[in-house]
Amino acid sequence: MAQYGLILYGDPTRWKKISPEEMQKVTDKYMEWGRKAASAGFLRSSHRLAEDVGKVMRGAGVTDGPFSETKEILGGFYLIEAASYQDAVKLTTGHPHIEYGGTIEVRQLHAVQG
């Protein structure tokens, strides 16, 4: 089985506009999707990014960021296993991130040899 990264992007201002009760409902949906994916045997790992700006490393040094002109930011990722891109997309269908206006980028990971 190949491994795929599900890379979640979204508008961070969206979450600041909802009540704490609604945020809890959203969080519960994400957690339930993760539990189902783990029970089904295809979820290997998942991580939400911390709410800080992070650091960007380039040849010229290290800066705070990433700051860009886009409205979507990287919010977290899942690592899953699937037989093909088609299967990875099918397994991802129904993830609540789409329901809440986010984008999920599905990318196959290069197999590490050795």
Image (cartoon, rainbow, N blue to C red):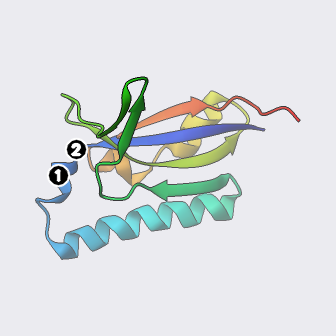
- Asked if 86 appears above or below 38 in the picture, the reply is above
Mark 1 and mark 2 in contact? Answer it, CB < 8 Å. yes
Where disc 1 sits, the SS reads helix
Q: Quadrant of the C terminus?
A: top right
| Name of the residue lying farthest toward the bottom | 21
What amino acid is found at the position of numbered circle 1 in the picture?
Answer: Arg
To which residue does mark 1 refer? Answer: 14
Q: Residue 84: where, in percent of width, then height?
A: 69, 30
Q: Image point 62% across, 29% down: which residue?
A: 85
- Asked if 31 appears above or below 62 in the picture, the reply is below
What amino acid is found at the position of numbered circle 2 in the picture?
Answer: Asp
Q: Residues within 10 Å of mark 1 (few under 14, many from 20)?
A: few
Apparent side of residue 92 relative to residue 85 in the rendered image (left or right): left
Q: Image point 60% across, 47% down: which residue?
A: 79
Q: How many marks?
A: 2
Tell me, for residue 11, which label it has, or none. 2
Q: Residue 41: where, in percent of width, then height?
A: 71, 57
